[in-house]
């Protein structure tokens, strides 16, 4: 895992994003934000499990499925199974050491 601070993220509404093998964060001080970093590490694990490319394909498909159902970008994002797992477990800093393979399926 490589953490990189990115100025382009300052224009977006996100604090961080995981694009294997990197975690991009908006503010340098967020390198110390253990919850944010754990959230993004969960995404890195999901990406590895899905062989990276299939993660992105499934993520986009799931996003548009929920967007067409809910007609709301933010609600669609929050319903994505990968995000649901990451938000549910981001405060558990030991989650990844105990996480089972494809645990995001519980959140479908």
Image (cartoon, rainbow, N blue to C red):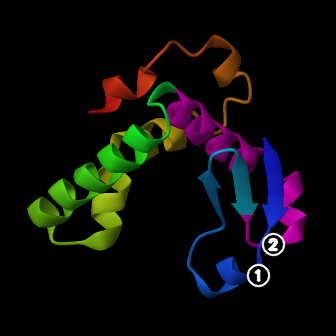
Q: What element carries label 1?
A: helix
Q: In which quarter of the image is residue 8?
A: bottom right
Q: In which quarter of the image is residue 10?
A: bottom right
Say left or right for 75 vs 93.
Answer: left
For marks 2 and 1, give the one nearer the viewer: 1
Q: Which residue occupies 63% across, 46% down?
A: 20
Q: Is mark 2 on a helix, strand or loop?
A: loop
Say above or below: 64 vs 13: above
Q: Which residue occupies 46% across, 35% down?
A: 85
The range drawn in magenta is: 25-48
Residue 26 in the image: x percent, y percent? 74, 72
Q: Which mark is residue 27?
A: 2
Nearest to the observer: residue 104 or residue 89: 104
Earlier residue among tags 2 and 1: 1
Say above or below: 56 vs 47: below
Residue 57 among magenta residues? no
Q: Residues within 10 Å of mark 1 (few under 14, many from 20)?
A: few
Q: Name the residue under label 1.
A: 7
Say above or below: 68 vs 59: below
Q: Which mark is residue 77?
A: none
Image quarter (top left, top right, bottom left or bottom right) of the C terminus: top left
Q: How crowded is mark 2: few (under 14 residues within 10 Å), some or many (20 or more)?
A: some
Residue 28 in the image: x percent, y percent? 88, 69
């Amino acid at each position: 895992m490589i953490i990189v601070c990115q100025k382009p993220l300052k224009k977006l509404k996100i604090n961080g994003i995981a694009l294997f093998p990197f975690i991009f964060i908006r503010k340098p001080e967020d390198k110390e934000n253990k919850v944010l970093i754990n959230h993004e590490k969960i995404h890195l694990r999901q990406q590895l499990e899905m062989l990276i490319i299939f993660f992105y394909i499934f993520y986009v498909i799931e996003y548009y499925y929920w967007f067409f159902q809910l007609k709301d970008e933010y609600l669609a994002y929050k319903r994505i199974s990968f995000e649901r797992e990451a938000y549910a477990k981001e405060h558990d800093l030991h989650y990844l050491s105990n996480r089972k393979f494809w645990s995001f399926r519980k959140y479908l």
